[in-house]
Amino acid sequence: MADRILLDSTYLLPTFGVEVEGISDQDLKGMRELLLRGEVEFFCLSTTWIELIGKVHREAERAGIDATGRFREAVKSLMEGGYYRWISPSSEDIVIAFKLRRLGHRDIIDNLLYAASITRNMILLTMDRELKEFLKKNGYT
């Protein structure tokens, strides 16, 4: 049975041409190979678009480029390429995310990602140390 992995936006940014410190082309190639061998399934939460749009826009402005064409191609690839399954937050995910916010974790998208990974028995792939430390400190796996 393939591992079910929920991806943080960090792992989607390279599709838009945004380099991410700590993620190499070799890492991305390895992820693709695992997928093609059927060892993993990759999932993305629909609310991740909120982060992606902001981050890609910010990087394009910083670089002084109009990234509209590349953005359109990347969106099509992510949505229609068949590598990722897009899911929406459930009502339970939203309640868990609210609890995490009340405990003090301010990043709502991360809270939703974590909640969705727990309710669906998925591995959350994230580089967010702050989230990991917060979860550990508050007794979450």
Image: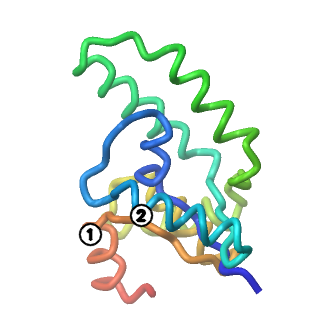
First in residue order: circle 1 vs circle 2: 2
Give the residue at x 73% y 43%.
Answer: 81
Pinpoint residue 116: horizontal percent, then vertical percent. 62, 66
Residue 100's tag is none
Report crowding for label 1: few under 14, some 14 to 19, many 20 or more residues within 10 A (C-alpha): few
In the rendered image, which residue does mark 1 sit on? 129
Element on which disc 2 rests: helix
Image quadrant in which the C terminus is located: bottom left
Distance CA(mark 1)–CA(mark 2): 19 Å
The answer to whether the residue labelled 1 contacts the one labelled 2, judged by CB atoms less than 8 Å apart, is no
Give the residue at x 34% y 65%.
Answer: 127
Pinpoint residue 53: horizontal percent, then vertical percent. 47, 30
Image quadrant in which the N terminus is located: bottom right
Q: Image height check: is 27 above or below 132?
A: above
Hey, what amino acid is under mark 2?
Asp
In the rendered image, which residue does mark 2 sit on? 27
Quadrant hosting residue 49: top right
Hey, what amino acid is under mark 1?
Arg
